Image: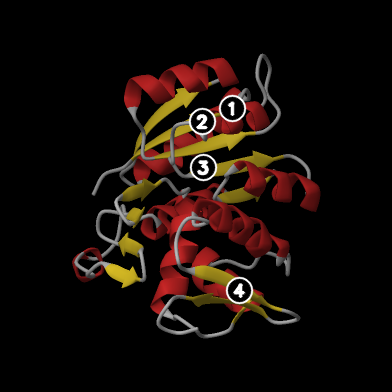
C-alpha cells in the first residue's frame, strides 16, 4: 500500500533529503516549510502520516500538533533539535506518536515511518486486519476499522491511545508493566521513560469514563484492564 507523507520543516536541505529517501522507498511525499502551510497541506492532501519539525517560523510544531489533534488522528512523528526528555514528553502529551532527534539518519526516518504506519494499520498484514472486534462490558474495539465505542457512543482516540487500549483488551485482567507496554505498543527503546505510558493511560481514562471498564493502577508495577466479568 502506498502511503502519503507530509514533511514539515523550514530547512530545505532536510526536506530534500527526507523526500528523496521516502520517495525511493515508494512513499508519496508532500512538503510544507512552516506551520501554517502544513495545516493547509493537511486539509488539501489528506496524508497518511506527518513528519513535523518543532522549531519553525510563523507557527511552531507544538501549535501545529495541538491544532491538528483538535480534529484529526493522523500519526505524527516529531523532529526536535534538542535531545531533551521534556520536548519528547510534551510532544507525546500533545498527541505525537514518535520522535526523532536531529541530526538523524534518513534511513531511520524511513524505518520509523514504516513502524508507525504498521501500528496504525496502514501496513498491517491481511490476517491482522481481519482480527474480529473485541468486546469487554460496554466497551467495543474493532481492530480492522480502528473504531472504539462505549455502548452506542463512538469514542475518538489518538492512534497510540487506540494501540494501547487494543493491547490491554487482548490481555484483560493481566498486570502489565510499563516497560512491557512500551515494548509492545511503542515498539522502540524510549530510553526508559515510562511516563509516556502514564500520559496515555490518563487520556484513555478520560475517554472511557462512561464505560464499565477501568484501567487500574498496580502500584510499583503497571496497569491492568478490568471489566464487569473480571473484577
Spatial separation of the CA atoms under disc 1 and disc 4: 33 Å
Query: Mark 4 and mark 1 in contact (Cβ < 8 Å)?
Result: no
Query: Mark 2 and mark 1 in contact (Cβ < 8 Å)?
Result: yes
- The residue under label 2 is 68
Q: Quadrant of residue 95?
A: top right
Q: Is residue 73 left or right of residue 60?
A: left
- The residue under label 3 is 76
- The residue under label 4 is 216
Give the camera-side residue of 70 and 83.
70
Q: Residue at x 52, y 85 (%)?
A: 174
Spatial separation of the CA atoms under disc 2 and disc 4: 30 Å
Give the camera-side residue of 8 and 60.
60
In the image, residue 142 lies at what x, y percent?
Answer: 28, 61
SS state under label 4: strand
* Mark carried by residue 64: 1
SS state under label 1: helix
Residue mark closest to the camera, 2 vs 4 = 4
Residue mark closest to the camera, 3 vs 4 = 4
Scheme of colours in the image: secondary structure
On screen, 201 above or below 79? below
**Residue 34 showing in the rendered view:** no
Q: Residue at x 38, y 32 (%)?
A: 29
Neighbourhood count class around disc 2 (C-alpha, 10 Å): few under 14, some 14–19, many 20 upward: some
In the image, residue 203 lies at what x, y percent?
Answer: 59, 53
SS state under label 3: strand
Q: Residue at x 25, y 67 (%)?
A: 133
The numbered mark, 1 or 4, whose residue comes first in the sequence reads 1
In the image, residue 106 lies at what x, y percent?
Answer: 54, 47
The numbered mark, 2 or 4, whose residue comes first in the sequence reads 2
Amino acid at each position: 500500500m502506498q502511503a502519503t507523507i507530509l514533511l514539515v520543516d523550514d530547512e530545505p536541505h532536510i526536506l530534500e533529503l527526507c523526500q528523496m529517501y521516502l520517495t525511493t522507498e515508494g512513499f508519496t511525499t508532500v512538503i510544507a516549510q512552516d506551520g501554517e502551510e502544513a495545516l493547509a497541506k493537511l486539509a488539501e492532501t489528506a496524508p497518511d502520516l506527518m513528519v513535523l519539525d518543532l522549531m519553525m517560523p510563523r507557527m511552531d510544531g507544538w501549535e501545529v500538533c495541538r491544532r491538528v489533534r483538535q480534529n484529526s488522528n493522523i500519526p505524527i512523528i516529531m523532529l526536535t533539535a534538542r535531545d531533551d526528555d521534556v520536548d519528547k514528553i510534551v510532544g507525546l502529551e500533545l498527541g505525537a506518536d514518535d520522535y526523532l532527534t536531529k541530526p538523524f539518519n534518513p534511513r531511520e526516518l524511513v524505518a520509523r515511518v514504516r513502524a508507525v504506519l504498521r501500528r496504525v494499520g496502514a501496513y498491517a498484514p491481511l490476517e491482522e486486519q481481519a482480527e474480529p472486534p473485541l468486546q469487554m462490558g460496554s466497551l467495543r474495539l474493532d481492530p480492522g476499522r480502528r473504531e472504539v465505542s462505549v455502548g452506542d457512543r463512538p469514542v475518538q482516540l489518538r492512534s497510540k491511545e487506540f494501540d494501547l487500549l487494543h493491547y490491554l483488551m487482548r490481555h484483560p485482567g493481566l498486570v502489565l508493566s510499563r516497560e512491557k507496554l512500551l515494548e509492545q505498543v511503542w515498539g522502540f527503546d524510549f530510553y526508559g521513560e515510562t511516563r509516556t505510558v502514564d500520559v496515555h493511560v490518563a487520556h484513555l481514562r478520560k475517554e472511557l469514563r462512561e464505560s464499565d471498564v477501568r484501567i487500574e493502577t498496580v502500584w510499583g508495577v503497571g496497569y491492568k484492564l478490568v471489566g464487569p466479568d473480571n473484577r
